[in-house]
Image: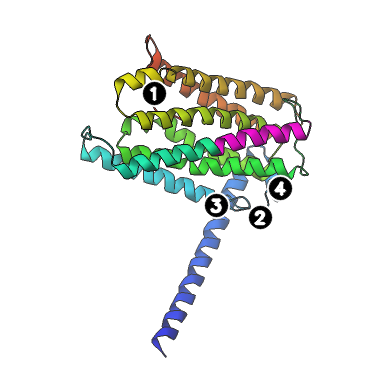
Amino acid sequence: MALSSFVDVFKSGNMNHLGQTWKSYDAAVSKFVFDGLSRMGYAEIRKPASPLTRGKPLIDSPTPLVTLIIVYLTTVSCGFLSQKLKGPKKQKADPLWLRILVQLHNVFLIGLSAYMSFTSAYCAWKHSYRFWGQGYSSSEKDMGWIIYVFFLSKIYEFMDTFIMLFKGKLEQVSFLHVYHHGSISAIWWAICYGAPGGDAWYNAFLNSLVHVIMYTYYLLATIIGKDAKKKKRYLWWGRYLTQFQIFQFVSMLVQAAYVWTVSPYPKFLSGLLFFYMISLLALFLNFYIKKHGGKSKSTPRKKMS
């Protein structure tokens, strides 16, 4: 047998083995997730995904997302421990490639967040949505699309944490940060799977609006660098950004409570958002009190969400 033929047979057999392994892994993870959500009261999870998102990457099975979250948490844990073992990082300027990467990352998320905020609001207006209390319709393809894009953006935002580790900013890799980034994509997978539209528009709209402002702040901070005078002049509004983020969580919590009790939107998803917002609000208030409590002047803020 020619060497090339042997290699082809080896590759074919190896790929078949990997394919079977993935199928077994996917079946086990999917069963665990679907059974768990079903026991929690989300009976609709037994049905196929919404026609608005069915067939799109990362939707029909929870396994790819679960795998990405595991990889994210493992990478963050290993990176954090590695930086800890190296000891405190010497105070020096970040390399040029990292500064460019961070600036491009922030510019991209400013643009993407502006697109998601505007488009979700436009779709809500186009379909004559109530501000709160709007049921989900499987005919609203444009709304389904923007909710799906919002879900994908939560996965891309894993980059926030990786950038912190590249910069050696271990104090920013807090429990709040990792908890939020590691869990929010799972919340929005469930929404994309079951009801990508209706009252979900409000969370996508408001969070995207907050992120336009937040990543603008981070972009300015990257450009300004360590110049104390420029920080005081251009980044004085950091604490007000944190207050706006807290307002966001309060607003989303109130909306989730309203939707849970009044709206025709799926009860499980609105309840899931309600309890999730309680956890984020509690953690964020704790961060705000530690960061700004008793201070009369604004200080450069940590990247939290």
Residue under the point 29% across and 27% down: 226
Most common secondary structure along the magenta stretch: helix
Queried whether the magenta region covers residue 298, the answer comes back as: no
Queried whether the magenta region covers residue 118, the answer comes back as: yes
Give yes or no for contact between labels 3 and 4 (Cβ–Cβ under 8 Å): no
Q: CA distance from mark 4 to mark 1?
A: 39 Å
Q: Give residue 220's position: percent from left, percent from top.
A: 41, 29
Residue that badge 4 annotates: 52
Using the image, tell me which numbered label, if any, was put on residue 63.
3
Mark positioned earlier in the residue sequence (2 or 1): 2
The amino acid at mark 2 is: Gly
CA neighbours of label 2 inside 10 A, class few (<14), some (14 to 19), many (20+): few
Nearer the observer: mark 3 or 1; the answer is: 1
Q: Give residue 267's position: percent from left, percent from top.
A: 70, 32
Residue that badge 1 annotates: 301
Mark positioned earlier in the residue sequence (3 or 2): 2
Q: Is residue 198 visible?
A: no
Residue under the point 54% across and 41% down: 153
- Position of 5 with respect to 189 (left or right) is left
Give yes or no for contact between labels 3 and 1 (Cβ–Cβ under 8 Å): no
